[in-house]
């Protein structure tokens, strides 16, 4: 049981990418620490989100003389790929270490531009608005296992990130000054450092394990260039904290060759602020992004069919928050299912996972006023993990 299902709960983390709360794409799981002996893995895959809706339009009193009728936004969420690497080394029965490279945060949102002269294009309120965030994290961990089946783990996490955001459309003032429409900010690549700490309790006879892990925030100091309609309006340094999180994971055998597993993950997205100097001055002290904390629940079952094949199925649920959201993260909660199949051949495990999630309806807002209604959004992700024990 233990050998067959070690790391079963981790099948979700690297084989089927998700569009989680905020800009999270992977839950930064540390289950590689619980693999047997020395172990290395490579994971890769892709996700295709679909997020679309209709803007609210503007009355004629705002845009004389004809106003602007509601218009479709088109699909504002672009697909993305991911790559992950991991290596775990077992020094002795008590001490092990791991190195993990992954891409936990990211965003690629763009609203099709609107031409106010011809009336063609996407949303008149948000057309031309976009956000791109790229990040890679590097985590070095140690784990010490005590004789009473209690273990502690911890280490350092470095994060490399950069971003670009553009605001456009009548939701930001349109072409008539004073306006934020035409604003662009570039946050140059920066490396920040945080830490990871946690503990676990295991019951080997039933493949049981409960682990609790805390990920600290990581502070970035981005060299920043702000522009308005292509003209540089400011150069500064912007401090951005990627959020802290707490993850509780558990698994246990319930019958021969059958395992149940689950997790609860809380992420402090309310501390994730992007406040470029000139923008906050023009926007009455308000920053680019305002997000709410998220809690994500996962529960699933794994089954060993024979010496070669195993599989799992899991449900993922993230409750909805206030449906007024940032146009740069235009979804609200999710419900999904992940299926994974594991092929074992000697010391190699090949895991293929697929996730389909319905994303909650949301209303992108500026200045506290809804600017669009996003409905019937979803995401399909597929990934592969190749693991080798030695």
Image (spheres, helix red, strand yellow):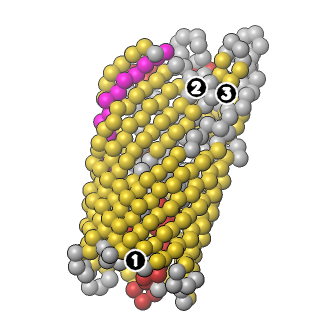
> Which secondary structure class fits the magenta region best?
strand
Residue 319, percent from left and from top: 59, 56
- Within 10 Å of the Cα at label 1, are there few (<14), some (14-19), or many (20+) other Cα atoms? few
- Circle number at residue 21: none
Q: Which secondary structure, mark 2?
A: loop
Residue 96, percent from left and from top: 26, 72
Segment colored magenta: 216-229
- Circle number at residue 128: 2
Toward which corner of the image does residue 254 lie, by quadrant? bottom right
- Circle number at residue 347: 1
Toward which corner of the image does residue 335 lie, by quadrant? bottom right
Residue in the picture at 55% in, 88% down = 255
Q: Is residue 198 left or right of residue 67?
A: left
Query: How far is disc 3 from disc 1 in space, using C-alphas?
Result: 53 Å
Indicate whether residue 57 is drawn in magenta: no
Q: Is residue 370 left or right of residue 275?
A: right
Residue in the picture at 70% in, 43% down = 375
Q: Which secondary structure, mark 3?
A: loop
Residue 314, percent from left and from top: 59, 68
Residue in the picture at 37% in, 48% down = 136
Q: Which secondary structure, mark 1?
A: loop
Query: How far is disc 3 from disc 2 in space, using C-alphas?
Result: 8 Å
| Residue carrying label 3 | 123
Q: Is residue 249 left or right of residue 75?
A: left
Pick whichever of labels 3 and 1 is earlier in the sequence.
3
Pick whichever of labels 1 and 2 is earlier in the sequence.
2
Indicate whether residue 225 is drawn in magenta: yes
- Within 10 Å of the Cα at label 3, are there few (<14), some (14-19), or many (20+) other Cα atoms? many
Question: Which residue extends farthest front?
Answer: 346
Residue 139, percent from left and from top: 31, 57
Residue in the picture at 27% in, 70% down = 89
């Amino acid at each position: 049981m233990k050998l067959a299902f070690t790391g079963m709960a981790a099948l979700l983390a690297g084989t089927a990418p998700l569009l989680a709360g905020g800009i999270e794409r992977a839950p930064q799981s540390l289950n590689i620490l619980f693999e047997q002996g020395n172990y290395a893995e490579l994971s890769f895959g892709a996700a295709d989100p679909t997020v679309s809706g209709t803007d609210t339009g503007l009355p004629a009193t705002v845009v004389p003389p004809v106003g602007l009728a509601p218009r479709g936004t088109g699909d504002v969420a672009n697909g993305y790929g991911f790559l992950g690497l991991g290596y775990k080394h077992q020094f002795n029965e008590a001490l092990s270490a791991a190195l993990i490279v992954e891409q936990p945060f990211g965003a690629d949102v763009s609203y099709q531009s609107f031409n106010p002269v011809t009336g063609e294009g996407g949303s008149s309120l948000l057309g031309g608005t976009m956000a791109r965030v790229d990040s890679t994290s590097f985590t070095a961990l140690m784990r010490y296992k005590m004789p009473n089946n209690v273990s502690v783990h911890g280490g350092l996490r470095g994060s490399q990130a950069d971003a670009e955001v553009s605001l456009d459309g009548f939701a930001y003032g349109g072409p008539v000054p004073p306006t934020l429409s035409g604003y662009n900010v570039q946050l140059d690549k920066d490396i920040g450092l945080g830490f990871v700490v946690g503990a676990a309790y295991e019951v080997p006879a039933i493949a049981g394990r409960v682990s609790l892990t805390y990920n600290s925030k990581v502070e970035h100091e981005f060299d920043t260039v702000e522009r308005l309609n292509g003209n540089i309006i400011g150069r500064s340094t912007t401090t951005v904290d990627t959020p802290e999180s707490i993850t509780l994971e558990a698994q246990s055998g319930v019958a021969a060759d059958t395992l149940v597993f689950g997790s609860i993950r809380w992420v402090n997205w309310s501390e994730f602020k992007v406040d470029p100097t000139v923008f906050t001055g023009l926007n009455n002290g308000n920053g680019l992004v305002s997000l709410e904390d998220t809690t994500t629940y996962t529960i699933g079952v794994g089954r060993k069919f024979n010496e070669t094949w195993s599989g799992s199925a899991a449900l993922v649920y993230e409750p909805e928050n206030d449906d007024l959201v940032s146009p740069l993260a235009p979804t609200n909660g999710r419900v999904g299912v992940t299926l994974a199949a594991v092929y074992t051949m000697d010391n190699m495990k090949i895991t293929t996972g697929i996730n389909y999630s319905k994303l909650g309806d949301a209303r992108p807002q500026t200045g506290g006023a809804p600017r669009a209604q996003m409905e019937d959004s979803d995401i399909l992700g597929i990934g592969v993990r190749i693991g080798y024990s030695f």
